[in-house]
């Protein structure tokens, strides 16, 4: 596996951020078109993908409570995952894994695993000891999460609409307790 994971931070050069936004949109667009159940349904345009990052994700990065990790290969973002850090005092021990995406052309190369391991380290550094996530039941990501030590908390039937049909699909909720970074 070539490339590396980095914690995404807005640059002082807006042109770099625009390029990154285009690459993030491309990964999301390709992932949805490949059938991933990540909140979007077809038809799904590049404009919608770009708007998701621009309006929903990027404003939450940094002090606002989210972290965005990207996997770059030869300068190109080909994978990403988000860590949401709840702010209420009774939730500061946990984080939520959101939108693990790898460009379909580059799957099965260890990128998702590298992103998740890096995310867990970021969570530890943020003082988080519990991670939660949800995934389409039976999806190809579920075995990855299990191999990383995530346990199933349960499955809710008919939780989310399939990306390519009106079918309502089950979602599995998972969690992992992190060992202390000390």
Image (spheres, helix red, strand yellow):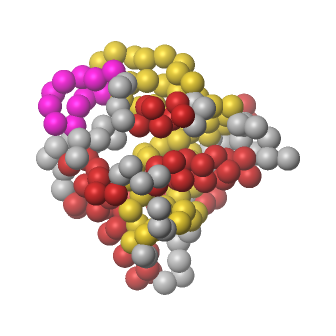
> Is any atom of residue 88 visible in this view?
no
Say left or right for 104 vs 128: left
Question: Does residue 98 lie above or below 176 as drawn?
Answer: below
User: What residue lies at 30% left-to-right and 37% top-to-bottom?
Assistant: 37
Query: Which quadrant of the structure image shows residue 127?
Result: top right
User: What residue lies at 66% left-to-right and 53% top-to-bottom?
Assistant: 122
User: What residue lies at 20% left-to-right and 48% top-to-bottom?
Assistant: 33
Highlighted range, magenta: 159-170
Instruction: Tell me where residue 31 appears, x and y as whole percent.
Output: 29, 50
Say left or right for 45 vs 113: left
Question: Does residue 152 lie above or below 82 as drawn?
Answer: above
Query: Which quadrant of the structure image shows residue 105?
Result: bottom left
Say left or right for 147 vs 180: left
Q: Nearer the viewer, residue 144 or 58?
A: 144
**Number of numbered discs on residues:** 0
Question: Does residue 101 lie above or below 51 as drawn?
Answer: above
Q: Nearer the viewer, residue 16 or 72?
A: 72
Instruction: Tell me where residue 182 appears, x and y as whole percent.
Output: 85, 47
> Is any atom of residue 118 visible in this view?
yes
Instruction: Tell me where residue 13 appears, x and y as whole percent.
Output: 49, 84
Q: Nearer the viewer, residue 64 or 110?
A: 110
Instruction: Tell me where residue 16 appears, x and y as whole percent.
Output: 43, 80
The answer to if 150 sits in the magenta stretch is no
Question: Does residue 78 lie above or below 166 as drawn?
Answer: below
């Amino acid at each position: 596996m070539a490339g590396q994971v980095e914690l995404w931070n807005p640059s002082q050069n807006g042109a770099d951020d625009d390029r990154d936004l285009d690459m993030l949109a491309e990964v999301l667009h390709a992932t949805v078109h490949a059938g991933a159940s990540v909140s979007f349904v077809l038809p799904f345009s590049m404009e919608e993908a770009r708007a998701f990052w621009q309006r929903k994700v990027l404003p939450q990065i940094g002090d606002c409570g989210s972290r965005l990790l990207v996997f770059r290969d030869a300068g190109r973002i080909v994978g990403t995952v988000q860590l949401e850090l709840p702010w209420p005092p009774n939730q500061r021990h946990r984080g939520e894994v959101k939108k693990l995406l790898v460009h379909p052309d580059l799957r099965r190369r260890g990128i998702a695993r590298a992103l998740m391991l890096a995310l867990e380290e970021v969570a530890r550094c943020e003082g988080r000891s519990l991670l939660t996530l949800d995934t389409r039941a039976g999806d190809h990501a579920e075995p990855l999460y299990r191999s990383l030590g995530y346990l199933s908390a349960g499955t809710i039937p008919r939780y989310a609409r399939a990306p390519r049909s009106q079918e309502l699909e089950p979602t599995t909720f998972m969690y992992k307790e992190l060992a202390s970074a000390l």
